[in-house]
Image: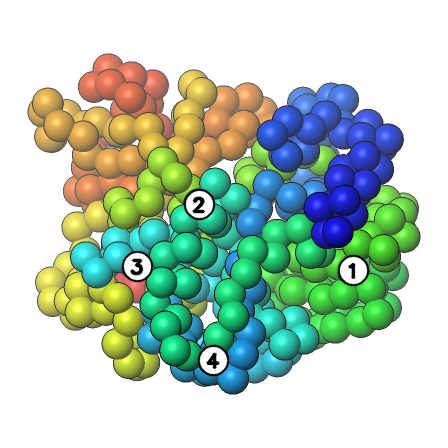
Amino acid sequence: MERIVIDSWKNFLQSQGAAIEDGTVLHYGDAAAERSATDGTIVADLSQLGVIAFRGDDTATFLQGQLTNDVRALHADGAQWNGYCSPKGRLLGNFLMWRQGEDYCLQLSGDIAAGVLKRLSMFIMRAKVQARDASDETVRLVVAGKQAQTAVAAAMGAVPEAAMHTRAGDAGQAIRLGDDKFVLSLAPERAVAVWQILRESATPVGAPVWDWLRLNAGIPMIVAATQEQFVPQMVNLEAIGGVSFQKGCYPGQEIVARSQYLGKLKRRMFLAHVDAEAAAGDSLYSADIEGQTTGTVVNAAPAPAGGFDVLAVAQVESATMHTLHLKAADGAVLQLKPLPYALPE
């Protein structure tokens, strides 16, 4: 039933001019013009992302023992960044997490959602927890930009007052990521009406535009090409509030804690621009590490003025004392940009 509803939603988006490929809205006819719309307010469909939902009496306890953040601190009107690690402390996925009705919802890259759900489900055993793929149960949009708060208030009736808080209404749930960014999780039958109100002050854009805004906010997304490559601190997950160092054990916790407290972290995530096409998983090189890679692209998106902006994990010394090159030792040069938040010392 949900699949039919979501297919109807995508048909509606196509009627609005959306070019959709493999479930992702690429653009609405003019990708270059959409990139320039980032100076204003945008609305984008998030169907390319997956949602895993958990419910049941033991859900909070179960997720507390699996994820990097303090799930027990996630109140009914709260949201948090979170991660899921292998026993070696490497990220299998990271999430925007919120509560919606009885569910704990984890939004993540669509290409890893099925695998993460399968792996987490293996550990439920006798706990009173039900896990499911909820990707098609709601319509999810993101609204960002100067008029985002006004647009969301008009469409949803009200907005969460603070970042990383949510507000439920008749149309669904609004999750506030910051001053000017909101994710909406909507009842499918209300999505068209919400969209039409949002369109009065927001420009529809494809997923690459939202990817660019997200990565320029310093928010990483683990995808299939980068699974099990990074300890959470390498992608600055603790800097955006996605790791709790006070909670109990979870897979990889000892390694994550060791990275935090023993010695200085040798790899960090940087924001950069490159005048070449880039993609998640691309290797980086620098002159100080001859013949070996010094880092990896975490996420990449076309930049409004041309080229690509990237989030990239690299050796700190290589990034700060030398020049990073894309894909080869003599490849395109990465020009570092300041992150919008401070990194822990």
Percent x, y of residue 293: 18, 30
> Between marks 2 and 4, how big is the CA–CA gap?
25 Å
* Secondary element at tag 1: loop
| Residue identified by numbered label 2 | 112
Residue 85 image label: 3
* Mark 4 or mark 1, whichever is nearer to me: 4
Q: Amino acid at mark 2?
A: Ile
> Between marks 2 and 1, how big is the CA–CA gap?
24 Å
Q: Amino acid at mark 3?
A: Cys
Q: Is residue 64 above or below residue 241?
A: below
Q: Earlier in the sequence, mark 3 or mark 2?
A: 3
Left or right of 40? Residue 242 is: left
Residue 320 or residue 265, whichever sits in front: 265
Q: Residue shown at 85%/55% (left/top)?
A: 189
* Mark 3 or mark 2, whichever is nearer to me: 2
Q: Earlier in the sequence, mark 3 or mark 4?
A: 3
| Residue identified by numbered label 1 | 187
- The colour scheme is rainbow
Residue 205 placement: quadrant? top right
Number of other residues with Cα within 10 Å of mark 1, as a class: few under 14, some 14 to 19, many 20 or more: some
Residue 128 image label: 4
Callout 3 touching callout 4 (CB < 8 Å): no
